[in-house]
Image (cartoon, rainbow, N blue to C red):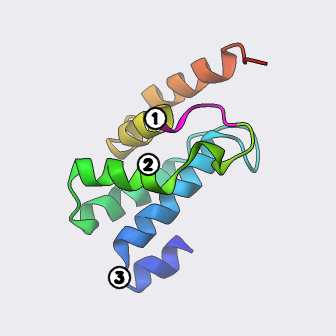
């Protein structure tokens, strides 16, 4: 879907689709929680092309992603936004380390 939005020149909508994809990956919707580097790189390109400020991107993320987007999230929307931001910077090892800490943390029941 993001590729089609990119072809149409809808870079903000492409960024929203990639935000959702990364949030799903972080929370293990299709498999175990993971950082998808390819999606992260495409999101960074879409963000750069969108002309949005960093603050506008953060608002878009929190408007797009809600805590109930997935049934049992590994991390909060705010925490996932931080991981998203460091992925935009290409800091994948740091993002992986954060994800591991969240997966190892005891869950509240």
Q: Is residue 10 above or below residue 77?
A: below
**Residue range highlighted in magenta:** 73-78
Q: Residue at point 23% right, 60% down? A: 52
Rendered residue at 73%/47% (across/down): 29
Left or right position of 56 against 41: left
Find disc 1 in the rendering and name its residue: 78
Question: On the image, numbered disc 2 is attached to which residue?
Answer: 62
Q: Residue furthest bottom?
A: 8
Report the predominant secondary structure element of the magenta stretch. loop
The disc at residue 9 is 3
Pointer 1 local density, CA inside 10 Å: few below 14, some 14–19, many at least 20: some
Camera-side residue of 92 and 22: 22
Q: Quadrant of residue 9?
A: bottom left
Q: Is residue 61 magenta?
A: no
First-in-chain label (2 vs 3) = 3
Q: Could you tell me if the residues under marks 3 and 1 are in contact, i.e. CB atoms within 8 Å?
A: no
Q: Are marks 1 and 2 in contact (CB under 8 Å)?
A: yes
**Residue at (50%, 75%) from the top-left corner?**
3
State which quarter of the image contains the C terminus: top right
- Separation of residues labelled 2 and 3 (CA atoms): 23 Å
Image quadrant assignment for residue 103 = top right
Quarter of the view holding residue 102: top right
């Amino acid at each position: 879907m993001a590729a089609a939005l990119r072809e149409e020149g809808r870079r903000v909508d492409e960024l929203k689709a990639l935000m959702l994809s990364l949030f799903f990956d972080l929370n293990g919707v299709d498999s175990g929680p993971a950082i998808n580097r390819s999606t992260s790189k495409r999101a960074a390109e879409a963000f750069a092309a969108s002309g949005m400020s960093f603050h506008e991107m953060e608002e878009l993320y929190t408007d797009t992603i809600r805590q109930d987007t997935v049934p049992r999230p590994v991390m909060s929307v705010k925490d996932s936004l931080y991981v998203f931001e460091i992925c935009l910077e290409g800091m994948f090892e740091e993002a992986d380390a954060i994800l591991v800490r969240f997966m190892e943390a005891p869950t509240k029941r």
